[in-house]
Image (tube, rainbow, N blue to C red):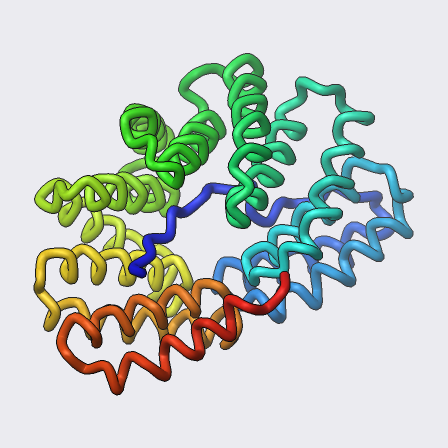
Amino acid sequence: MSRIRILFLLAGILSLNLCSGCADRMGQMNKEVMRLYQAGDYKRATVIAEKALKVAEESVGPDHPDVAISLNNLAELYRDQGEYAKAEPLYKRSLAIREKALGSDHPDVATSLNNLASLYRAQGEYAKAEPLYKRSLAIREKALGPDHQDVAISLNNLAGLYQAQGEYAKAEPLYKRSLAISEKALGPDHPDVATTLNNLASLYRAQGEYAKAEPLCKRSLAIREKALGPDHPSVATTLNNLALLYQAQGEYAKAEPLYKRSLAIFEKALGPDHPDVAASLENLASLYRATNRPELAKPLEARAAKIRAIKR
């Protein structure tokens, strides 16, 4: 089965504001985590993020909002690597700290709600994700105004949830509103703009509107390659989605090199057992079957099945 990855805009790796005594050490660690995360080197970033959490807990105590940031960062890295069971308790603890310290309607609470919802969505737990996304959106619109970039993030993510459930009519206006806010707030060449372009393109592809999808997908790819570098996982996602678009139209010669490049990037950045690697293997295998090459498809399908069987 061909798979499109809907990209979710999370809080990402956040900055810390710690006591002066540990500020230099934590600042250096946090900058390195951010650098590695943005480069797509999640494994090395995780090692440093785990250390940063320990330093934060020792410096300001286990219930401080700065610890919530470290928890979010580590959870985000686990989630991106498909380690959902490790991520969930960290997101929940981060949310609990923020609600207690900052109040239930604080924008940082909205961030934790958004990220926990995205974790549930990644696991197909849509009923758990939807109320969290809606609460996050409501907090942000009230606290930040309707045209804030964080509102765009919530709109994009709620749209992606609807798309994943086939509710395309609900998803499209949310994607369009998200895109308009992001382009105005960040400029036309920002990676967050690329994310919503990718997602809107995937929505059009799912409905067979290929002429609408292709220019959006190509623009998303160009932005990401320029902003993030050619070997970033987000580039791999857009390559995969552009390949799916070509395959859907029978343009197999255009699709195959894109699938192969996407797979290579995912394997290098995320490791051989990540769910996105499985999706890439399945997509390339589907192309081989569509072009009467079952002998090439079978080993890819078998490997993908093994990855899918891993308990996360």
Between 83 and 19, the one nearer to me in the picture = 83
> Quick check: 255 above or below 200?
below
Between 31 and 20, the one nearer to me in the picture = 31
Between 124 and 253, the one nearer to me in the picture = 124
Residue 289 percent across, percent down from the top left: 21, 74
Query: What residue lies at 70% left-to-right and 68% top-to-bottom?
Result: 47
**Would residue 118 be visible to someone looking at this image?**
yes
On the rendered image, what quadrant is the C terminus found in? Answer: bottom right
Query: What residue lies at 70% left-to-right and 56% top-to-bottom?
Result: 86
Residue 99 percent across, percent down from the top left: 76, 26
**Would residue 226 be visible to someone looking at this image?**
no
Q: Quadrant of residue 66?
A: top right
Q: Quadrant of residue 241?
A: bottom left
Residue 111 percent across, percent down from the top left: 60, 33
Q: Is residue 280 left or right of residue 39?
A: left
> Quick check: 105 above or below 298?
above
Q: Is residue 283 left or right of residue 265?
A: left
On the rendered image, what quadrant is the N terminus found in? Answer: bottom left
Q: Quadrant of residue 195?
A: top left
Residue 243 percent across, percent down from the top left: 21, 62
Q: Is residue 49 left or right of residue 151?
A: right
Q: How many marks?
A: 0
Query: What residue lies at 78% left-to-right and 33% top-to-bottom?
Result: 96
